Image (cartoon, helix red, strand yellow):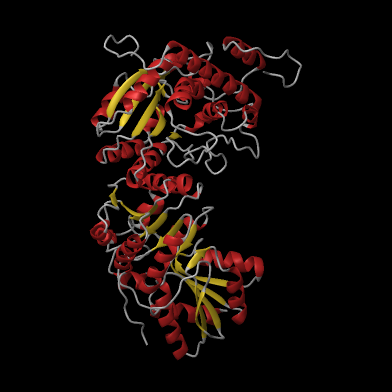
Amino acid sequence: MTLPMGRPMREVFGETVAELASADPRIVMLDGDLGSSTRADIFEKAHPDKYLQMGIAEQNMLGVAAGLATMGLIPFISTFVSFAVVRPLDQVRVLIAQTGLNVKITAGYGGLFTGQTGMSHIIVDDLSITRTMPGMVVVAPADDTEAREVLRWAAAYQGPCFVRLVRDATQRLFEDGHRFELGKVVPIREGADVTIFSTGSQTPRVVDATDLLAARGIDAHLVHVPTIKPLDVDAIVAAAGRTGRVITVEEHTIMGGLGGAVAETLSEHRPMRVDRIGLRDVYPESGPNDALLDIYGLSAVRVAEQVEAILRRR
Amino acid sequence: MTDRPSAPPSPIDAAEAARLAEIARRIRVEVIRAVNHARAGHIGGPLSAADILAALYFHVLRIRPEEPAWPDRDRFILSKGHSSIALYAAMALRGYFPVEELLTFDAAHSRLQGHPDMTRLPGLDMSTGSLGMGLSAGMGIALGARLTGRSCRTYVMVGDGECQEGEVWEAAMAAARYGLDNLVAIIDHNRLQQYGWPGDGPDGRTPPQAPGELAGKWSAFGWRVLEVDGHDVAEIVRVLEEAGRGDGRPVVVIAATIKGKGISFMEGHYYWHTRAIKPEEFELAMAELGERVAPAGTTGGLR
């Protein structure tokens, strides 16, 4: 069985922040000239006076956000992950993370789905970079339902956060009523043979992969980890202990992101082997989404193959 | 600008000018004392900024030192954060915290970090230190003031060397587009940076910009440009009050200053950007500032 497609997270972004701003006059949207891509244009239509075009100048945009936050406003950022995290990295570090100011780095075009733009736009080390930044909270929702909940949470949360959103429609895992809780994992599937941790929009594909594995007699225990930081250490240690075999899967480099966080945590609390599925030391190329998932081993079929191979090797 | 015949008279009288000049002198004394005590720290930039800080904190800014988070206060950001000790001295003299605390500058557990940290010291309106960022934050404050209906003004001091950072010009373009005439950038134009390009200027270096270059650039970016002698407190007050009369454009005040101002052997030398002060240099500096120093061999009692 394959999970159905949901709506693109970027549409959910524009709509949800617009809804939030209707209820909270402190919310403003800062756009780095990508509102027609990130769908901040939906927000602009609803709140033209709260939509602040900052032009193609991301360092300034993140600094302006810090200043706005000191005035009691709640700025949401509209640009791609590359240009929200890496281009203005020092501004995020000095003006937002070090100050703890209430800026919402809600960046679209996370992961491989960047509209066939190639390696300048694709960023697969954003979770590693933001996670190692003191003071920063890091969240990667699984689908449109969870993205909406995370954005609602972000508006209410006092402090800086990075939310990784996805451009295109991805599979829907959660029904309405699903609640996001910061720093808590979401158990997806009970199983006895191997514990799999997954994050972001990779999780629905791993759900499909566990169905494929079940058909081959492998009973996987799947845990979705939407909050990369702060990590749900107790739940991760407990879930790992259920099977004694751990695999992480992420649409991200295997260095320093979910896989890194889980490996660090388990090496301290319950040492065991951790295999990490994700991008190796590579800058991804451009191409259609399905082709990229296949090339980088992140489609349901390719994840199932790798899990099976890992378990066979052990 | 003081010799410009058309310049209107300063709004302050001679007594107020003398008061502000004395405060600037005391800022310089505290800068030298704190940097000497810490055995580290920037010197040249804090000394060039002292008169501007005296005018701001003792005449221009609408602030309440006893209520540093007063929502309607004017904001000040020291974008050239390496001159922090001059800002701390101005704040201490103005009553934000005890003057004695200045000797904790750069020490472990101090609220007076090498570069300003707003999470430690109440009264700092932004953390700075990585150059180029202050004007963006100031633009955000000015824009936020407009959105929230507050009449406060935001002043950002930027170094002339700092104007080599691209972000300064990103902020300049965006602030002009928003017509933020509640935003004032003050350039501490001391014509030296930490080391500088090689050239035939003083000590074999070249100033950060050619004469007139900054005025032309800021004007081209849509800002109202005012120029002033950055060591004439009466003129600084006059120009900053002129800057307050908004005409729909953000304002830049280009203040001609001298790096190391007030200490003869420091003035105009790039190598006093940051440098440990020798004991004999400390005594000479204090003497030039008209400050009595305790005899050698005694501890404390420097005031």
> Would you place residue B84 above or below residue B170 in this image?
above
**Residue A183 location in percent, x, y?**
53, 67
* Above-or-below relation of A193 to B103: below
Q: Please tell me which residue is depicted at 50% across the width and 41% down the height of the picture.
A: B69
Q: Is residue B10 above or below residue A194?
A: above
Q: Position of residue A282 (x, y in %)?
A: 41, 60
Of A60 and B226, the residue lying toward us = B226
Is residue B17 visible to us here? yes
x, y percent for residue B96: 56, 33
Residue B245 lies in what quarter of the image? top left
Total marks in image:
0
Residue at the (64%, 32%) spot, across then down: B104
Q: Quadrant of the C terminus of chain A?
A: bottom right
> Where does the N terminus of chain A fall, quadrant-wise?
bottom left
- Picture quadrant of residue A106: bottom left
Residue A182 point in image, percent of width and height: 50, 66
In front of the other: B278 or A27: A27
Position above or below: B147 against B194: below
